[in-house]
Amino acid sequence: ILATGGTIAGTAASGTQAGYASGQVSVEAMIDAVPGIRALADVRGEQVANVGSQDMTFAIMIELANRINALLADDAVNGVVVTHGTDTMEETAYFLNLTVKSKKPVVLTGAMRPATAVSADGPLNLYNAVAVAADSAAADRGVVVVMNDWIHGAHSLTKTNTTSVETFLSPINGLIGTVNYGKTQYFRRPFRRNTDTSEFSVASVTALPRVDILYACADMPADLIACSVSRGARGIVIAGDGNGNMNAATIESASRAAGTGIVVVRSSRVPTGRVSRNVEIDDDRFNFVVSDELNPAKARILLMLALLKDRSREALQQLYYAY
Ligand code: ASP
């Protein structure tokens, strides 16, 4: 169990207050708070970080990926659980889905309520996550997230509610499976490339290229594009309206940037659905890429990893269909 912090390791002064601090409890204390967990597996804890996931960094994600790869290369290790804050859990899950090189189970889990809360959800989530990581039937399903009895794929899940324990949904592809007090059931495997079939590696990477996300809205100021470019962005993901749209002024600035080699990816601020090429925006003419099913945060991660190597726009577009 690799611990990184989050609400699952959070504490508050009382069991019913909304205010709390993330990332306070150690991994050993978290394990000790879960009755029966040591009967599921021979668990060992490591503290990789102890932050609220709003403070998650790519340095920590790279360290996690490399540590998971080292652990899973050991025959004595059957699976890994990562405890993580829920705010950016989908980003780390997707990053690991692209950079872990093993079919063995890798399971992220967390909590919506701090460890000290009435009805804290962390202990059962951790119990279920260990049950999935110890289950050989969970292998070869990519990196998964176990929260609230559900097993989500890294590609499909997204956080949908600021406070509810039923916050994660997999709206387009559905669940990988369910887990109920450690009893697992599986429905499908991810059909996108992941883990051992992914071409991405961070084994010798220390930093990733800058990619910014710009949120489209009515009367969006077009100079945000130039601002990102001037700050060194090599890619820009537009969290577009609807099917990845943006206003005419932003299309013009974005296409100018795309003409100078900045990669512009159209994603959507809408929670579900694909962004498709050449619908209301002529991607062929403007040299844009579409994110297909990836939301802006995950589209950014794929582009950051993709930009570690020179690739044509066409090759980048194909990555969004493959991953
Ligand atoms: N802000 C917290 C975090 O992401 C929320 C949580 O874990 O539920 O670390």
Image (tube, rainbow, N blue to C red):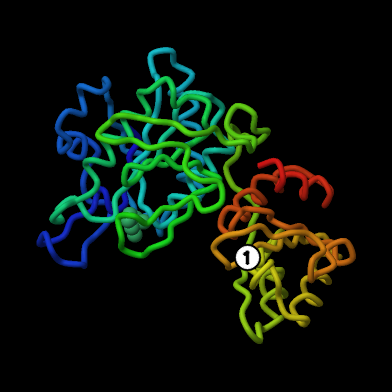
The reply, left or right, for residue 241 in relation to residue 247 is: left
Q: Furthest residue to the top?
A: 75
> Which residue shows up at 78% across the image and 75% down it?
251
> Which residue shows up at 78% across the image and 76% down it?
253
* 10 Å crowding of disc 1: few (<14), some (14-19), many (20+): many
Above-or-below relation of 104 to 227: above
Front in this rendered view, residue 15 or 311: 15
Above-or-below relation of 249 to 318: below
Q: Position of residue 64 (x, y in %)?
A: 45, 37
The reply to whether residue 49 is in sight is no
> Which residue shows up at 58% across the image and 53% down it?
298
Secondary element at tag 1: strand
The reply, left or right, for residue 39 in relation to residue 224 is: left
Quarter occupied by the C terminus: top right
The reply, left or right, for residue 197 in relation to residue 178 is: right
The reply, left or right, for residue 148 in relation to residue 263 is: left
Above-or-below relation of 275 to 99: below
Write down the quadrant of residue 240 in the picture.
bottom right
User: Badge 1 is on which residue?
Assistant: 268
Q: Position of residue 60 (x, y in %)?
A: 45, 45
Image quadrant of ligand 1 equals bottom left
Write down the quadrant of residue 278 in the picture.
bottom right
Q: Position of residue 294 (x, y in %)?
A: 61, 53
Quarter occupied by the N terminus: top left
Which kind of residue does numbered mark 1 sit on? Ser
The reply to whether residue 122 is in sight is yes
